[in-house]
Image: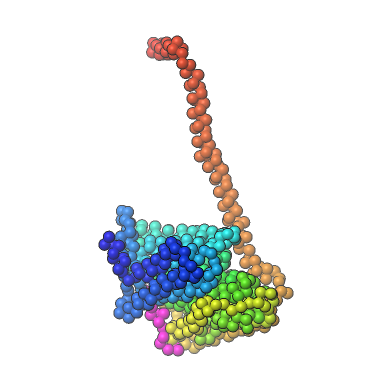
């Protein structure tokens, strides 16, 4: 009882308990009109207020901790259900609860006509709760609990409109793909218990910080641990080869896409790696693996986004590509750059998804950008918001994306040289092109369908979050500016004071950094201009060549997976089911039953019910026994 009282009184616990209470109330009660959404928004906003109060304590303390209570103990394996808050995680809490509140408010209007509002907002609050558990848990088992929680909630939210088969299949695809990745987290937990003797994050960090104990570990332990965590991160944060679930997640309502793809679930892999950074910082080979996988993901997803016609699909592949940028920063040994882009991306990608939802809502659920056009005048607020999101994600000068992408490109140049920098710059150029392609096809020219001609602006409850996110997308990047511009490097302070210091390497001179910044800016502006020239008058269909078909069909990755992985697994499963289940288990059971039946039928021959027959059989038996004893 004392442990329960302690956890309730702890300030960090309230950040989790508030949205959990909202999920419980929405799950139990169906309120009228938009009250379910307002209730869920109120609880998420309350968690945001508490998060602000905790953030303000950091000028005085480097870490806040709630010891919590002992969850379970089995032998030397002990799991403590406690919470801790470091400076960089306090910023992440503001993103989860702050952007989450805006998404909840937007969804209140967006889902106002849905018959299952209560269920939707219960899932949405539960998702935020799970993400907060993942972020705040001081033990890897608690982190894994939140990790699995967001996986389950994503399945429920992506497949929310499960009446349509494609939506249900998308939810199952996300769930199963993440389970493949989660195997890596389990392997990391097993390694932690076997060699560190603890799953506590601080306990593992203390072990690694002790040179004597760290040197006593087998050389492969830290490598396997780091690779296992990265494999798990590939599932949640959509890196090759486990990115395939994220584009299909567009089947869920637009607020779900914004919540999953912007500030929460897809960044969880980066957050866990940054929390465990002292291990990764010592594994240069693992960082190389992370970098090249991330670079491949950023390029592949950008190429896929070039030809998509579904507005939300363009943003989905954009998310995969931007996650590649974040992991590329980690692979370059720069956790600050990765986390900085996590925060800026949360703002402008949430803005883009919510604006896309506003456009689709105004277009009467039409998602094809080839059928849009001319929406600049019909949806002026949505037009401004989407344009702000485009300039931010493209890295136009002085926007948030400009600062975070410039930092990533600079760190990649320092760590991976010209080749790594050039390929990542190409991905940035493609980003600018496909985003402005979607902008011009959606808002420029003239309407190309009946829905576009009769499009309408969204309600104020949907527009207000867009305006707030627009301001964040423009200005939050000013919290981490280049050193030659001044001394505003708050993200560096928050990340490094949490124990995630960059891997030491060659630092470029100021002149080189100016040159790199100029090259990236010119490349981004040139790509946007090329998109304007090509698509200002509408779709271009004459370029549907082999390369276009490859991009439009996502390089046939899903078909390759289906042919070489899923179908063989189904055949193996069918064979195992036939031979083991049917012939093995069922055959054994049926054979045993048949043998018992035959044995019973044979035995019944001797059960005649005649006393004389029994007496004769007894006499014969005695003669047989006598013969055996005396003759043998």
Q: Residue furthest right?
A: 542
Q: Is residue 508 left or right of residue 73?
A: right
Q: In this rendered view, identify the residue nearer to me: 219 or 63.
A: 63
The quadrant in which residue 627 appears is top left
Residue at 53% x, 81% y: name it: 392
Count of labels shown? 0
Taking 371 as reference, is 196 left or right? left
Q: Residue at left 49%, top 25%? A: 599
The relative height of residue 24 versus residue 440 in the rendered view (above or below) is above
- The span shown in magenta is 484-501
Who's the residue at 50% across and 19% down the image? 605
Residue 223 figure quarter: bottom left
Q: Is residue 43 left or right of residue 376?
A: left
The quadrant of the picture occupied by the C terminus is top left
**Residue 388 position (above or below residue 40):** below
Magenta stretch encompasses residue 494: yes
Q: Position of residue 28 (x, y in %)?
A: 43, 61
Q: Residue 251's x, y, as percent?
A: 57, 65
Confirm whether the magenta stretch covers residue 386: no
Q: Is residue 610 visible?
A: yes
Outermost residue toward the left? 2
Q: Nearer the viewer, residue 262 or 322?
A: 262
Q: Which residue shows up at 36% across the image and 64% down it?
A: 139
Provide residue 243's location: percent of width, then percent of height.
54, 65
Q: Where residue 460 sits in the image (x, y, percent)? A: 53, 79
């Amino acid at each position: 009882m004392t442990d329960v009282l302690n956890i309730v009184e702890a300030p960090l616990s309230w950040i989790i308990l508030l949205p959990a209470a909202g999920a419980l109330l929405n799950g139990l009660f169906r309120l009228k009109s938009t009250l379910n959404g307002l209730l869920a928004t109120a609880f998420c906003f309350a968690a945001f207020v508490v998060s602000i109060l905790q953030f303000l304590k950091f000028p005085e303390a480097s870490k806040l901790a709630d010891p919590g209570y002992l969850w379970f103990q089995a032998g030397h394996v002990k799991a403590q259900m406690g919470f801790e808050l470091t400076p960089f995680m306090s910023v992440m809490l503001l993103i989860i609860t702050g952007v989450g509140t805006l998404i909840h408010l937007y969804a209140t209007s967006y889902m106002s006509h849905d018959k299952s509002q209560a269920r939707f907002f219960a899932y949405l609050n539960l998702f935020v709760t799970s993400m907060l558990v993942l972020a705040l848990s001081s033990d890897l088992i608690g982190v894994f609990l939140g990790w699995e929680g967001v996986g389950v909630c994503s399945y429920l939210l992506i497949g929310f409109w499960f009446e349509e088969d494609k939506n249900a299949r998308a939810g199952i695809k996300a769930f199963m793909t993440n389970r493949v990745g989660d195997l890596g987290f389990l392997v990391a937990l097993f390694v932690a218990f076997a060699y560190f003797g603890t799953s506590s994050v601080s306990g593992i960090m203390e072990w690694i910080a002790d040179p004597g104990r760290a040197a006593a570990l087998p050389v492969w332990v830290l490598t396997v641990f780091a690779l296992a965590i990265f494999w798990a991160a590939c599932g949640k944060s959509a890196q090759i080869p486990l990115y395939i679930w994220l584009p299909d997640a567009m089947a869920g309502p637009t607020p779900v896409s914004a919540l999953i793809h912007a500030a929460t679930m897809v960044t969880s892999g980066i957050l866990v790696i940054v929390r465990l950074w002292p291990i990764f910082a010592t594994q240069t080979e693992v960082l190389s693996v992370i970098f090249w996988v991330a670079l491949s993901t950023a390029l592949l997803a950008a190429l896929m986004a070039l030809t998509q016609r579904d507005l939300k699909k363009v943003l989905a592949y954009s998310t995969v590509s931007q996650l590649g940028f974040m992991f590329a920063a980690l692979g370059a040994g720069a956790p600050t750059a990765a986390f900085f882009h996590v925060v800026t991306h949360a703002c402008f990608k949430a803005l883009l998804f919510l604006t896309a939802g506003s456009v689709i809502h105004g277009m009467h659920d039409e998602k094809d950008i080839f059928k849009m056009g001319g929406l600049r005048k019909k949806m002026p607020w949505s037009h401004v918001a989407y344009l702000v999101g485009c300039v931010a994600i493209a890295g136009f000068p002085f926007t948030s994306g400009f600062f975070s992408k410039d930092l990533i490109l600079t760190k990649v140049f320092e760590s991976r040289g010209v080749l790594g920098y050039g390929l990542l710059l190409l991905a940035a150029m493609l980003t600018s092109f496909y985003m402005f392609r979607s902008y011009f096809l959606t808002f420029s020219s003239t309407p190309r369908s009946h829905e576009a001609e009769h499009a309408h602006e969204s309600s104020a409850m949907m527009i207000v979050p867009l305006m707030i996110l627009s301001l964040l997308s423009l200005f939050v990047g000013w919290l981490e500016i280049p050193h030659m511009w001044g001394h505003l490097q708050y993200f560096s302070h928050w990340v490094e004071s949490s124990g995630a210091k960059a891997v030491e390497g060659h630092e470029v001179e100021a002149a080189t950094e100016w040159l790199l910044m100029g090259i990236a800016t010119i490349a981004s502006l040139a790509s946007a201009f090329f998109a304007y020239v090509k698509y200002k008058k509408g779709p271009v269909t004459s370029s549907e060549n082999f390369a276009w078909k490859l991009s439009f069909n996502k390089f046939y990755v899903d078909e390759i997976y289906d042919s070489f992985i899923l179908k063989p697994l189904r055949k193996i499963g069918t064979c195992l089911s036939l031979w083991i289940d049917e012939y093995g288990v069922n055959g054994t059971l049926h054979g045993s039953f048949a043998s018992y039946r035959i044995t019973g039928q044979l035995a019944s021959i001797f059960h005649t019910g005649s006393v004389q027959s029994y007496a004769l059989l007894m006499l014969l038996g005695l003669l047989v026994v006598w013969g055996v004893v005396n003759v043998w």
